[in-house]
């Protein structure tokens, strides 16, 4: 940051993003994991049907991320993220008040669209554009804070559900998006936003998106995302298969979450030590090795805890690798548009991961074999990242020039 007023404005923006992204994940994602059984019991809709509506919304959000990235590239994050929070509040209200299953599904599709404007990718774009060379520290701070979304919102949602019921709980949570997240974004995401929407830049984007490097890192990230989310959903069932009791399995899952925080704290050092592709390959490699160890090693408990913590660290690092890979290769200037495309297949993989894991377990005959398949996917992703090479597409000086121009602009500019 060049001057004090801009530094203050950027700090306020980072705080607002930490708060709003944490709320968004808590309300639009984690609350469902707590309230799903109550929804099924109250409505009579099967657990499969309820989960299918949620997954459909996740798929819609993944696809919508491409369009959100393009709009953000032209208009900046203030419009996209504020509109996302307002839409999210309305969508959650639709879910809460849904009288029939079709309306419930529509509500979740709207939730998915809202998530495209409120989750990590648009926030990463804002921090990448405004923080320039300091983006790694800012993004790390955001993911450390928002990483506690489940820690905050799982017990909060459970308490609200017990006190008021699932419908009322969702309405209360929707109010947080409406009265906290949306105003915070509207009031603080006001730093200048430089963009170019001309034909030359659209052509440059196409050159990047069709380049060998982009295609390989996109496939690599998608394979690793599929392995990561499928393993996370099925970790407790795997441990129960190994003979671990439910209480210990829950502890192992919780400690793996602590590992994510440790991994994210280590990311700035990893960023300095390794090139982008080497960093990505190393993280996915550790993920693959830990998944293989979970498949093959039934115990003792301390070993399972250690492996789970290492796996959690890999997951935490993977989030940050995905946040910085596009800007590391192609600069910050076209980050929003390109990153929206990069994250879309990863979002689809995350949405399909629970069903994919269940299908693989059914075909292979159990959870250990399923984790072996997931390990192979993660290691394949690591191999692709390692051979992706350096981009020959467009980077140039546009990104640096945009950052320099933004640094000298007024914090109140649009």
Image (tube, rainbow, N blue to C red):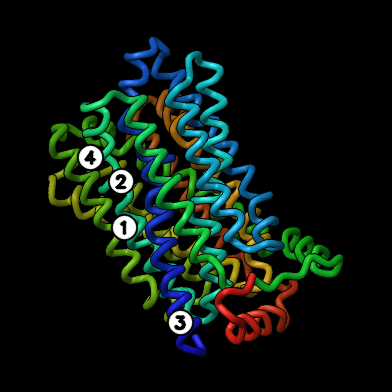
Element at label 1 = helix
Q: Are marks 4 and 1 in contact (CB under 8 Å)?
A: no
Circle 4 or circle 1, nearest the eye: 4
Who comes first in sequence, dot 2 or dot 1? 2
Q: Residue at x 44, y 21 (%)?
A: 50
Count of number-bearing discs: 4
The answer for how far apart the CA atoms under marks 3 and 1 are is 29 Å
Crowding around mark 1 (Cα neighbors within 10 Å: few <14, some 14 to 19, many 20+) is many
Residue under label 3, please give it.
7
Circle 3 or circle 1, nearest the eye: 3
Crowding around mark 4 (Cα neighbors within 10 Å: few <14, some 14 to 19, many 20+) is few
Residue 191 at x, y percent in the picture = 57, 73
The answer for how far apart the CA atoms under marks 4 and 1 are is 20 Å
Q: Residue at x 34, y 55 (%)?
A: 147
Who comes first in sequence, dot 4 or dot 1? 4
Element at label 3 = helix
Residue under label 1, please give it.
260
Residue 235 at x, y percent in the picture = 30, 39
Element at label 4 = helix
Specify whether 172 is left or right of 382.
left
Residue under label 4, please give it.
155
Who comes first in sequence, dot 2 or dot 4? 2
Element at label 2 = helix
Who comes first in sequence, dot 3 or dot 1? 3
Is 277 rendered above or below residue 22?
below
Q: Residue at x 46, y 33 (%)?
A: 92
Residue 41 at x, y percent in the picture = 32, 14
Determine which of the numbered discs, if any, sits on residue 150 in the image: 2
């Amino acid at each position: 940051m060049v001057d004090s007023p801009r530094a203050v404005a950027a700090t306020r923006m980072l705080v607002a993003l930490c708060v709003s992204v944490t709320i968004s994940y808590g309300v639009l994602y984690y609350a469902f994991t707590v309230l799903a059984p109550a929804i099924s019991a109250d409505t009579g809709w099967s657990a499969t049907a309820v989960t299918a509506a949620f997954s459909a919304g996740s798929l819609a959000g993944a696809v919508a991320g491409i369009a959100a990235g393009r709009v953000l590239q032209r208009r900046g994050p203030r419009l996209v993220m504020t509109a996302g929070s307002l839409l999210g509040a309305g969508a959650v209200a639709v879910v809460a008040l849904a009288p029939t299953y079709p309306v419930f599904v529509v509500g979740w599709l709207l939730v998915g669209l809202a998530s495209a404007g409120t989750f990590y990718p648009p926030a990463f774009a804002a921090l990448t554009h405004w923080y320039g060379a300091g983006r790694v520290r800012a993004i790390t701070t955001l993911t450390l804070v928002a990483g506690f979304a489940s820690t905050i919102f799982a017990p909060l949602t459970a308490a609200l559900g017990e006190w008021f019921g699932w419908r009322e709980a969702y309405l209360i949570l929707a109010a947080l998006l409406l009265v906290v997240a949306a105003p915070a974004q509207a009031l603080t995401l006001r730093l200048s936003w430089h963009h170019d929407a001309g034909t030359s830049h659209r052509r440059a984007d196409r050159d990047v998106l069709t380049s060998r490097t982009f295609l390989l890192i996109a496939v690599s990230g998608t394979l690793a995302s599929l392995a990561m989310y499928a393993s996370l959903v099925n970790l407790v069932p795997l441990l129960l298969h190994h003979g671990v009791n439910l209480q210990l399995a829950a502890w192992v899952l919780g400690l793996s979450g602590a590992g994510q925080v440790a991994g994210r704290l280590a990311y700035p050092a990893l960023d300095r030590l390794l090139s982008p592709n080497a960093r990505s390959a190393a993280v996915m490699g550790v993920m693959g090795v830990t998944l293989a160890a979970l498949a093959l090693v039934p115990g003792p408990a301390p070993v399972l805890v250690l492996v789970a913590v290492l796996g959690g660290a890999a997951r935490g690092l993977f989030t940050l690798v995905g946040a910085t890979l596009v800007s590391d290769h192609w600069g910050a200037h076209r980050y929003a548009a390109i990153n929206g495309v990069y994250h879309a297949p990863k979002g689809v993989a995350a949405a399909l991961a629970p069903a994919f894991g269940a299908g693989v377990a059914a075909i292979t005959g159990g959870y250990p074999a399923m984790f072996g398949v997931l390990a192979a996917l993660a290691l394949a992703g690591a191999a692709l990242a390692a051979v992706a090479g350096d981009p020959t597409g467009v980077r140039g000086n546009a990104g640096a020039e945009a950052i320099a121009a933004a640094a000298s602009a007024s914090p109140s500019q649009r």
